[in-house]
Image (cartoon, rainbow, N blue to C red):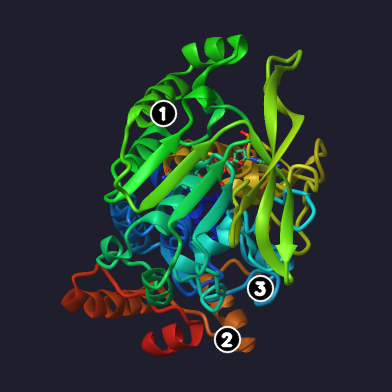
Amino acid sequence: MGIPLGTRDHPLRVAVVGAGPAGFFIVESLLKAPDLAVSIDVFNRMPTPYGLVREGVAPDHPSIKKVTAKYDRIASEPNVRYFGNVTFGRDVDRQDLRRHYHQIVYAVGAQADRRLGISGEDLPGSHPATEFVAWYNGHPDFAHRSFDLSHERVVVVGNGNVAVDVARILITDPDALAATDIADHALEALQSSRVREVVVLGRRGPAQGKFTSVELKELGRLDGVAVRVDPSDLALDAASASAADADRVAKRNLEILRELAGEDRADCERRLWLRFLASPVEIVGSNGRVAAVRVERNRLVQTESGYIRSIGTGEVETVDAGLVLRSVGYRGVPLPDVPFDADRHVIPNRAGRVTDGPGGPAIAGEFVSGWIKRGPSGIIGTNKPDAAETVAGMLEELGRGETLNPQSPEPEAVIELLESRSVRYVSFDDWRKLDEHETKEGRPRGRPRVKVVDVERMLEIMGR
Ligand code: NAP
């Protein structure tokens, strides 16, 4: 009998792929596990940590970003190492991790967007909202994108919090964003934006909006912006009324929408329309780019399972717009050599244990957490119980003695591997240098930071 795994002389070696909230909550949960000696390496594609907290949370929501203080404490633990600028599948692959770790956790989020599947979707001027978000947040992959803000009206499709975020950023007076960490290129573009009206289209009714009440209420408080809701859109069918009665968020959302519908802010130059029961059926082009959206009026029907869905009535109108942002959800993409459920766009799993295909047998030593486990839903905090469930499975496997049995679990072996491949990985201390640089740049301008949006420049500042 050798020394038991998970003890001081034989720590459990865990690789976490992804340094967003899902990855950090896995690390936190492992560190809290009683009587466990663990050594954790976190790999991240970008040099910068925090995933969607840096690249997804809106710049005018700084309080949501405060969670990074917790992640910083976690990353400072002596048994946690951060390897930024390491791409899974290119710099290290699944077989490498299986050679160096007892357990692997994939926490890579959902990297792509869902599609509408309508004609004109790919016309210039029609973009996934997720890309607009990544652009204004300075994600290096999207920093050079451009969005045509030269027309008065933008249509945003979808009724989730991302739709609310992009609508708010588009219609907010840019002076109010100047004191945030919005990317410089986005601030400049918004300062010369001619957009004065944003129309948000929900395919179902006001009781089925996916946005949370705080976010919805915030729209009514934007300076110089009139929020318009057609009171007739707020008349509920019987099924929606009873569903909303039983749902605290839907009930509160309806109250807020009724207040907004009753407001008269005719003096505002900027307008935000919240429309319901309205689906885009075609994005219409002119001179090779977006000119309008054909919008069909819907009605709601309840299916046998109780789900309330929308169906078209055949009544169609045309809404002129120079830009369309499709905000109908994120979508997970496969990782090289890792099982994938192509219907649900997640890594197939049972309570966080990766399975060999949907419903297949569990694969020893491989786990999953966050959006790539459950799909793109919930807020940052939702990842905490999600991680706890995955870690419970990891500890159970450890207890059964069924983890992987890696050839080279010693911590130096991974560094040797990365160096032998000339991977320019960065540590958490390297990130701290960039963090300091960004915050220092922000100080004289009264901003929390000025983001560096180019990977080479990041590496240069980090001294790599
Ligand atoms: P989401 O909450 O899933 O919302 C997607 C929206 O797209 C829904 O309204 C959905 O309508 C609609 N939709 C889907 N397919 C459609 C189609 N073919 N035509 C028209 N509409 C369609 O997704 P999300 O907004 O991308 O947000 C992702 C997650 O991040 C959510 O959990 C969200 O709460 C979270 N988030 C939170 C914050 C925050 O806390 N401040 C900020 C941003 C994001 P149906 O309901 O009819 O399917």
From the viewer's perspective, tell me whether residue 211 is left or right of residue 338: left
Give the secondary structure at mark 1. Answer: helix
Q: Is residue 20 above or below residue 251?
A: below
Residue at screen point 53% across, 44% down: 200
Residue at screen point 81% across, 35% down: 359
Residue 43 at what x, y percent from top left?
54, 67
Which dot, 1 or 2, sits closer to the camera?
A: 1
Callout 1: few (<14), some (14-19), or many (20+) C-alpha neighbours within 10 Å? many
Residue 301 at what x, y percent from top left?
71, 18
- Amino acid found under the numbered disc labelled 2: Glu
Q: Is residue 393 above or below residue 406?
A: above
**Residue on which the image places disc 3:** 92
- Quadrant of ligand 1: it is top right
Q: Is residue 290 above or below residue 245?
A: below
Q: Quadrant of residue 296?
A: top right
- Amino acid found under the numbered disc labelled 3: Val
* Residue 208 appears in view: yes
Q: Which numbered disc covers residue 425?
A: none
**Residue on which the image places disc 1:** 257
Which dot, 3 or 1, sits closer to the camera?
A: 1
| 3 or 1: tag closer to the N-terminus | 3
**Residue on which the image places disc 2:** 419
Which dot, 3 or 2, sits closer to the camera?
A: 3
